[in-house]
Amino acid sequence: MVEIVDQLDLSQVVNAYAGTGSRPYHPAMLVALLFYGYATGVFSSRKLAQASHDAIAFRYICANTHPDHRTIADFRKRFLNELAGLFTQVLLIAQAMGLVKLGTVSLDGTKVKANASKRKALSWEHANRLEEQLKGEVEELMRLAEQADNAARPEALDIPQELKRRGQRLEVIAAAKAEIAARAQARFEAEQAEYERKVAAREARAERTGRKPGGKPPKAPTPGPGAKDQVSLTDAESRIMPTAGGGFEQAYNAQAGVDTETHLIVEQHVTDHTNDKQEVVTALARLEALPEVLGEVEALLADTGYHSAANLDHCEAAGVEPYIPEARQCHNPPLAERLADDPPAPEGQPTPAEANAHRLRTRAGKARYAKRKATVETVFGIIKHVLGFRQFLLRGLKAVQGEWALVCLGWNLKRLFALRG
């Protein structure tokens, strides 16, 4: 860890220190401390501070000094963007060591619990009901204030304080309702665009074939918030998301693209989208932004949650061969199916969807796609169940993105140590 950090360009962090005040801990030491903590499953600043006393590895990294938890937490919070920017530098070091060359990337996402409780959320229906209740209570308190000279009131009732408390709650509710309404409008615009695309596709198909398209016509979306649309009062940018084990959790959707040969994470980002369909474009853009010396991505492996005609078109436009099944693939297929010859290629110029479907029915395509589960899902399993990272410590999408970058950095450094032998 110390050897790797010594090779990083930390000028942005070092130059941020002013020449006043008491002598600070050197940034390289604090960076190595954070990286080693995230690589070994120690994420809390208090636990990192305690480890600088208890664990010989942490004592070595800290040069037998003992930064307190506030110093560690403030350093992480202050330089979160700069620390996340070191992700690419570590990949370049891996490339210089001859350990990474981009080719096939497995993409997947996992729900990571936000630093917020799902019980501290406010739905549209409950917000309206609570707002009406509080406004009624304000009117009643104003009436009691007007009658204060002519009628007795409970001694414990402090009308100005009660009015202030309800006014503050009404402000919180108004902000929550505004956020819910903005999300509903964004959702409606996206659904309306998708609706218009489907209608246009049906009309084009009808014109091409001269027959009325089968199936039910697409249903136009309804504008405005739904009764169960909600926002968290603790971390407004987190979302209620379904979890793999069943149920729902206040969470973020953490994405990772993993190189199938080395198991190194080469792309990572966090989103507040519940499903994965919208993440292919972001992943392709971030992979495209990597330095050329790392190589070019040739193929993208992703599960059915990423499948859409638009995503396949984006992959083709980026020069990446997608392996994204349209439906779930069954386990333990019959022997005859496994030994069957490859189906004939589509005639003429196939669409990206037709080419993708054909690739996944060939032996080579099946073998390539089979690497997905053994790569990216393995990474998520170790991060969550071995290292124990199941919840973000920070709040807000930008801060959470920085923290996920630290987690992925910790994983990559752990893998570099193993790959180096």
Image: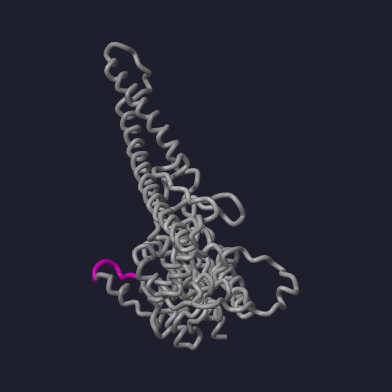
Q: Residue furthest front?
A: 210
Looking at the picture, tell me which residue is in the foreground, 362 or 368.
Answer: 362
Tell me residue 415's x, y (percent).
Answer: 54, 78
Seen at 43% across and 47% down, the residue is 221
Tell me residue 175's x, y (percent).
Answer: 34, 43
Tell me residue 338's x, y (percent).
Answer: 71, 75
Res. 371 image quadrant = bottom right
Seen at 49% across and 47% down, the residue is 117
Assess whether residue 12 is covered by the magenta stretch.
no
Vertical comparison of 241 with 229: above or below: below
- Quadrant containing the C terminus in the rendered view: bottom right
Query: What's the magenta region?
Result: 19-24
Seen at 47% across and 41% down, the residue is 228
Res. 150 image quadrant = top left
| Colour convention | one colour
Q: Is residue 130 left or right of residue 355?
A: left
Q: Residue furthest top?
A: 150
- Can residue 387 be seen? no
Looking at the picture, tell me which residue is in the foreground, 316 or 179.
Answer: 316
